Amino acid sequence: MTILDDAEIFRNEALRDIGAADSPERLEAIRSAVLGRSGKLKDLMVRIREVPPAGKREAGQRLNAIKAELEAAWRGRKEQTAIAPSGPLPDPTLPGLTQAIGSIHPLTQAMENFTGIFERLGFTIRHGPEIEDAFHNFDALNMPEDHPVRDQADTFVLDDNAILRSQTSTVQVRVMEEHVLRHGGGSSMPPIRIVSPGRTYRPDAVDATHHYGFSQIEGLAVDRNVSFSDLRGFLALFARETFGEDTATRFRPSFFPFTEPSAEMDISCAFCRGKGCRVCRQQGWVELGGCGMVDPNVFDAVGIDSEMFTGFAFGFGIERLAMFMLGVDDIRRFTENDLRFLRQF
Ligand code: DAH
């Protein structure tokens, strides 16, 4: 066998081995056995010494060509094995890994539901601060200094003139003040139609239906000739949109310092359709919250002409509504952050 015959056999075997190598480790082993310092190619190079002078040149050229060819084949294979995964391919029929994504808190869902309905009726969403002063929480709402709800035991007091708001009615005052600043409170004042959802605070003992931190949605509409029937119409529409077309509404006379007349609004129980059940405590009705016609004293406090304008206002507790809608029996569930509860919504 001449060196050239051996070189061809070596070349073919080496190309076959390189092509069959299926991992970077295997390729590395082949490189050292074939092209390495004490590899087979080196042995063949050494044998050129034995070739008669006339054949040396041809043998040298052939071995150099084989070397270049093998190196190129090796590099190509290395790129392929680097990309191709080693080991068995993953089974594409197995179920994928799911990523746990959060969801919107049930209270927020309820809140967005309510504000969405009012937005479609032409109301704008407004927000106010949770830390308030006595003027916005009490004075401007016709609750003078000696009013019983101003008892410190009924409000969280932070310092001299800072409290945690006990109702979202504060936002009524802020919105009207801002409106008057911009337009004046007289004949050039455009109408107001806002709803304001948000957190409110009262030092109540916590039980299944009470919490010291809760949420309300406040509404206010001010224009010329706004009447109590407008109030009833809007709120009845809201109730039907929220709880179903056949929801009945009822208004009971009540008292709030900032509305005159004032009412409590009830809706027929969506679960028993007014017959009486556990959810409505056999009443057939569920209380939504307070409402009424803005008291002229409130308009006076913010500088709106109470001869020219009338308005209606309402304030509903969101937790109570959400509990009713979602069938939740304990207000504490909303703040416990128990994933078993939250995942249901
Ligand atoms: N602010 C009252 C409360 O927290 C609820 C309320 C009653 C709001 C009547 C109003 C209203 O706007 O007109 O109990």
Image (tube, rainbow, N blue to C red):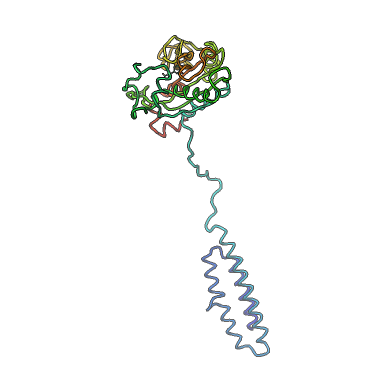
Percent position of residue 92, x then y: 56, 48
Q: In which quarter of the image is ligand 1?
A: top left
Residue 268 makes an appearance in the image = no
Q: In this view, does 271 lie to the left or right of 152?
A: right
Percent position of residue 250, x then y: 48, 11
Query: 307 or 110: nearer the eye?
Result: 307
Query: 247 or 272: nearer the eye?
Result: 247
Q: Quadrant of the N terminus?
A: bottom right
Percent position of residue 34, x then y: 56, 74
Percent position of residue 258, x then y: 44, 15
Vertical placement of residue 55 versus 84, above or below? below
Kindly indicate the quadrant of the structure image that contains residue 17.
Answer: bottom right
Vertical placement of residue 101 versus 308, above or below? below
Kindly indicate the quadrant of the structure image that contains residue 159.
Answer: top left
Instruction: Tell me which residue sits at (65%, 81%) in the image.
Output: 4
Residue furthest to the bottom in view is 53
Q: Is residue 344 left or right of residue 81?
A: left
Residue 92 makes an appearance in the image = yes
